[in-house]
Image (spheres, rainbow, N blue to C red):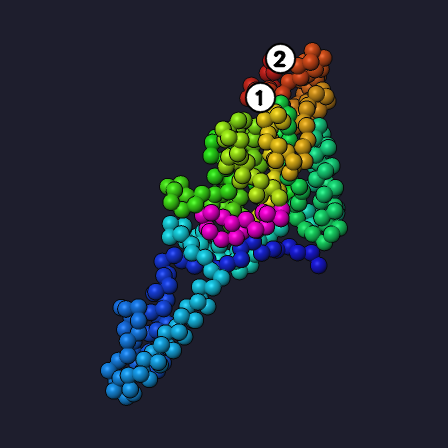
Amino acid sequence: MKRTRVPVLFKKPISSSLSRQSVANAVAREFGLRSGRMFPTGTDEIEVDEFFAEDDDRRKAGERHRRINRAVERLVDQKFNGTFDVDRNISETSVKRLHHLYAHGARLAGPDTAESVYELAASLHAVAPWLSEVSTSIMNQGLAHIAAGGSGLRFDPMILVGPPGCGKTHFARIVADFARTPRAIIDVGAGGAGFRIAGLEHGWVSARSGVPVELITATAVANPAIVVDEVCKAGAGMRSVDGRSTSLTTSLLQLLERSSAEHFTCPFLRTRVDMSHVNWILTANYESQIPEPILDRCQVFRVEVSKPEHIVAFFKRAAGDDVEPDEMERVRVFVEEMCEMGRPPSLRQIGRLAKTLRATGRDLLI
């Protein structure tokens, strides 16, 4: 039977305002009420009341008092066993989502039959035929996953390497969109990517969970697609002066391996979160600037849009289905000339051209 939901949170979230002492006092009061005696709650120890002392000698009273304290400790241990404290600054909505994840697990989104895997691959190939090698890999891994009794989108971490404007990030987006699974994009060039991937522990002003954990919590989907965009922009900053890996490399390495991702500990929540179902797509302009340990853990696909028919097809989709034949012919001639010169236009340039066409009411200038 296919699993459509999987556990991702293994301890019950509990409010940090619920201190151990307050719970012990509440349990002690309950003991007192049930035995007909009310124990004080303002001290750590439960004192024997005067009635109890007069009714029995002090030695027996003290022993009974110690037995009650031990019973209270056992009950408090049971309550706090298998829990983790939720930061008091976390919103009530997020706390409820964490409770839901703990109680019900997270959904596996995406293809659940071989036919739906084929449909996903066909859709990807139709939109980005120059990336057919990537869509074929996703298809083959999806078919193997379904055949093994799995469900949902699942593929090994990959890196798309190619010049700017060749559709790397666009393809990463549509993989998630066509598979109907949540996605998030982490731009390495914006700085702090390592913290946004793994999260930041308490003690920092910007302490919070990483983007993947937040996305899983918000959507209750265990297998989102996380896009780490332009990982090569970190360049030499991905390693310290003495050659040790810096935060981005370290954060990625523990999550790209499914075996270690399964036991990932969120530094903000301070509890284990199973991240082994997450699908990772990294993009880079230059393979030489990617650290070797990351390359070793990923499939590497080299992306290049050099065929005129692929560029023209992209323009047609971007401009709309009502493009006039003479307009398409002018674009085709322009693209072929640029390709013959060894300077094929990037998809970003073609996208701007299509946008200009729509904005100027079909007055195309080339």
Give x and y (percent) for residue 201: 43, 45
Q: Residue at x 43, y 59 (%)?
A: 14
The residues colored magenta run: 258-274
Residue sticking out furthest to the bottom: 55
Give x and y (percent) for residue 259: 62, 48
Q: Residue at x 33, y 74 (%)?
A: 29
Identify the image quadrant of the C terminus.
top right
Q: Is residue 354 magenta?
A: no
Q: Residue at x 59, y 50 (%)?
A: 262
The crowd level at tag 1 (other Cα within 10 Å; few <14, some 14-19, many 20+) is some
Q: Residue at x 46, y 68 (%)?
A: 78
Residue 168 sits in quarter: top right
Residue 278 sits in quarter: top right
The crowd level at tag 2 (other Cα within 10 Å; few <14, some 14-19, many 20+) is few
Q: Which residue is mark 1?
A: 352
Q: Is label 1 in contact with label 2 (beta carbons under 8 Å)? A: no
- Dot 1: element: helix
Identify the image quadrant of the N terminus.
bottom right
Q: Which mark is residue 366?
A: 2
Residue type at mark 1?
A: Arg
